[in-house]
Amino acid sequence: MRTAVMTDTNSGVQIKEAEENQIFMLPMPVIMDDQVFFEGKDIDKNQFYGYLESGKNVTTSMPSPGDVLDMWDKILASGYDELVYIPMSSGLSNSCAAANQFADEYDGKVQVVDNHRISVTMYRSIFDAKAMADAGCSAKEIKERLEADAYNSSIYIAVDTLEYLKRGGRVTAAGAAIGAVLNIKPVLTIQGEKLDAFAKVRGMKKAQAKMLDAIEEDLNTRFKDVPADKICIDTATTFINDSDDEEWEHMVQERFPQIKHHENRNLSFSIGCHVGPDAVGIGISVLSK
C-alpha cells in the first residue's frame, strides 16, 4: 500500500525540500493590500517582511477548499492508495476542521491529522509521517501515532517589537509604547492550541536566555524520561540577516549539545505576520517514528 504525506507551508518545510523528499506541499495564501500571493512560491521572506515594515495591510489565510481537494484528487490519481494530510493546529486555524469535513467524502483514503503543531514542531511531524509511510504504515496508523504525541512539543518565540502584536490586537497601543521605551521583549509560547504570553524581559539577549531556560525546564520535567535520541530541538526566526540566524543556532547547539539539532528555519508567515521581523524562535519535539 502506498501512502502519501501532504502538508502546507505552515510546517516550515521548503517547497524544494518537499519535492526532494516526495512530500506534497500546499502553499499558504498571503494577502497584501488585497493581492494574493502564495508562501514559498511567488513571495519570499524579504518581500513579506518588507511589506510588513512598510505598514501595508498583511494577513494570511487558510487555503481554499478547491485547492485542497484538487491536490488530494491528483495525489490519489497518481498511484497512491491513500494520503495523510497534516495542516496547522486546529487551535490556530479552521483549516484542519474544514479538511476533516472534506475527508469524510473519501471513504477513509484521506486521513487528516490534528496534532496541534505549527512551524518547527510541525516540521518534525511531517518527516516522522514520511518515515512511517515509507516503513509501510497506513494513513490511519500514522494519524493515530502523530495525534497520540500531539502535545509532546513546545515552541517559544521572542518578539523584537510589539508593533505587530499591537496591529493584531494582542497588545494595546499604550502597552506597545511603554514596551518600546523600556526595551521590553515579550516571550510567547505555543503549546498546541494558540499563541500565548510566556514572559516579559528587557532586551533580546535576556529573552533568548529565557527561552533556553524554558527548553531546559521542558527537558528536566515534561520530557525527563524520554531518551535524548528521541528528542529534537529546532530553531526558527524571522531574521533577514543570515548571520543572525547562525548566531542563534550556535547558541542553542552550545547549550544543548546532547540533543539532535537541525539548521535554522524561517518562521511561517502565519506566525510572522503577528511577531514581525527579527523574532527568534525555538521548538522542542518528541519524535513519533
Image (spheres, rainbow, N blue to C red):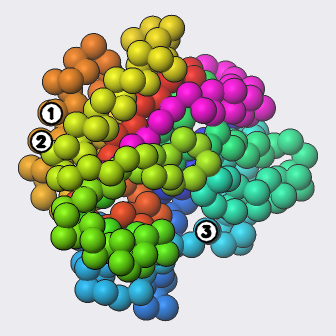
* Image quarter hosting the N terminus: top right
Tag 3 secondary structure:
loop
Name the amino acid type tagged 3: Met
The residue most toward the bottom is 34
**x and y, in percent, of residue 213 in the image:** 30, 29
Horizontal side, residue 110 vs residue 175: left or right: right
At 35% across and 88% down in the image, what residue appears? 56
**x and y, in percent, of residue 204 in the image:** 19, 51
- The residue singled out by tag 3 in the image is 62
Say which quarter of the image contains residue 63: bottom right
What range is drawn magenta here? Answer: 134-158
- Can residue 12 be seen by looking at this rendering? no
The Cα atoms of the two marked residues, 2 and 3, are separated by: 33 Å
Horizontal side, residue 202 vs residue 21: left or right: left
**x and y, in percent, of residue 99 in the image:** 75, 57
Horizontal side, residue 269 vs residue 248: left or right: right
**x and y, in percent, of residue 183 in the image:** 19, 62
Name the amino acid type tagged 1: His
